Image: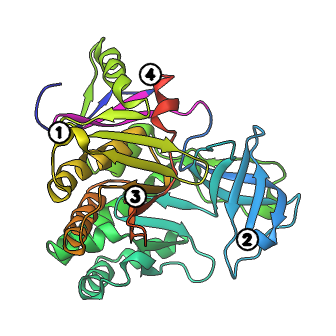
Amino acid sequence: MAEQDSYILVDDLTAPQRLAFYRCGQLAEIWVSSTADELGSVHYARVTAVHKQHRRAAGQLADGTNISWQTRPGIPVPAVGALTLVTLTAFGWQGKPVQASSGIQLAGHFCLLSQSHKTPGTVRLSKKSTGSSGTAHPLLAALCRTGLPARLQEAGLDLVIRRRATAATAAGDSEAVASLVRQEADFLIADFIQHSGTPVRVSAIGTPGCLYPGLPLVEQAKLYARCGAVRLAAATDFEEIKDQLARHLGSRYDSPCGAVIWFEPTRAATMIDVDSAGSHLGPAQLGRLILPEIFAALRLRGIAGRVLIDLPYSGRAEQKQQAALIEGLADDDPRAPEYCGFSASGLIELRLRYARHSLDMAAQRL
């Protein structure tokens, strides 16, 4: 485990319950398998409520699990009591139900496949990629040359190109990235067809049930982290990991540079405060050292939602340098944190999508 490389450590190669992501030899993230339905699974759910004013609906799975999802403009919302297709996207937090998306969604690293409600076979950019037209249009053209639209049309799906793909195109060859996207899409479609077959019309289904169980946990992890190296853990590896995590479970984290980082979760946001007195560093140097540590902690702790970071005051020129560092750190995180800028009072604001359970909950099952 001391090797300086990146890999996924699993407790079992065929039916893993625990996964540890290593990045350059350092523990980066922990996953524990769900005791219920996994993320990415597709279900016929019973609609139990429709909240038009909030553009949300609620429902139940076959096992009674409560779920909630956002309704989309232009797509009719089934009446209460009817069945509808949903894909599970995030485990519940702070008493919230499991989160879902309407319809079929197959998530990859570079692309997102979704059930087509109009003309299947459409390939388009995500909203976050629309500003990258200089690299996006060559990628779109290259994808069309792969024959991907015809493959999608056959499966009744559309494809959204994620920002990661356009960013990779900016740093490389659009044809090579298009090939990666096509391979990923083919893999997702093949697995979906193999384990679900052609979806039956919802009107022909009488009771809630699971259409597609989702990718196996290891395959999810490999796509998520863009890492193909998987290693089997030794008997004591996860016990050692549990011991390592002790210093990351509390609200206080002592940085090697002498600063203290405080993590204070609330229902609205996670507040992060940096006490710099023990570091004897100026704001600029402290920011360069402490921001990578904060981003590593966000991933390892599984912190999601809104995050507000209070660093010692720095001038505009230093904030500009910090912003460039933050954007690079966000691009390097598989969860793709959204950097929202500095607030009027100087707080760094981030937004991270909820998905898996936080480290506090995962550590209980390690």
- Helix, strand, or loop for circle 4? loop
- Asked if residue 42 is among those painted magenta in the image, a careful observer would answer no
Q: Main secondary structure of the magenta part?
A: strand
Between the C-alphas of marks 2 and 4, the distance is: 37 Å
Q: Residue at x 79, y 73 (%)?
A: 53
Residue visible at 29% across and 86% down in the picture = 141
Q: Are marks 3 and 1 in contact (CB under 8 Å)?
A: no
Question: Mark 2 or mark 4, which has the lower sequence index?
Answer: 2
Tag 3: amino acid: Gly
Q: CA distance from mark 2 to mark 1?
A: 47 Å
Q: From the viewer's side, name the closer residue of 134 and 158.
A: 134
**Tag 2 residue:** 55
Task: Count neighbours of disc 3 (C-alpha within 10 A) and say few if under 14, some if 14 to 19, many if 20 or more.
Answer: many
The stretch drawn in magenta includes residue 29: yes
> Relative to the observer, which residue lies in front, 274 or 290?
274
The amino acid marked with disc number 2 is Arg
* Quadrant occupied by the C terminus: top left
The label on residue 366 is: 4
Marker disc for residue 108: 3
Q: Is residue 136 left or right of residue 266?
A: left
| Residue at disc 3, secondary structure | loop
Q: Is residue 304 above or below residue 255?
A: below
Q: Residue under circle 1?
A: 257
Disc 3 and disc 2: Cα gap in Å?
A: 26 Å
Q: Earlier in the sequence, mark 2 or mark 1?
A: 2
Counting residues from the N terminus, which is met first, the one under dot 3 or under dot 1?
A: 3
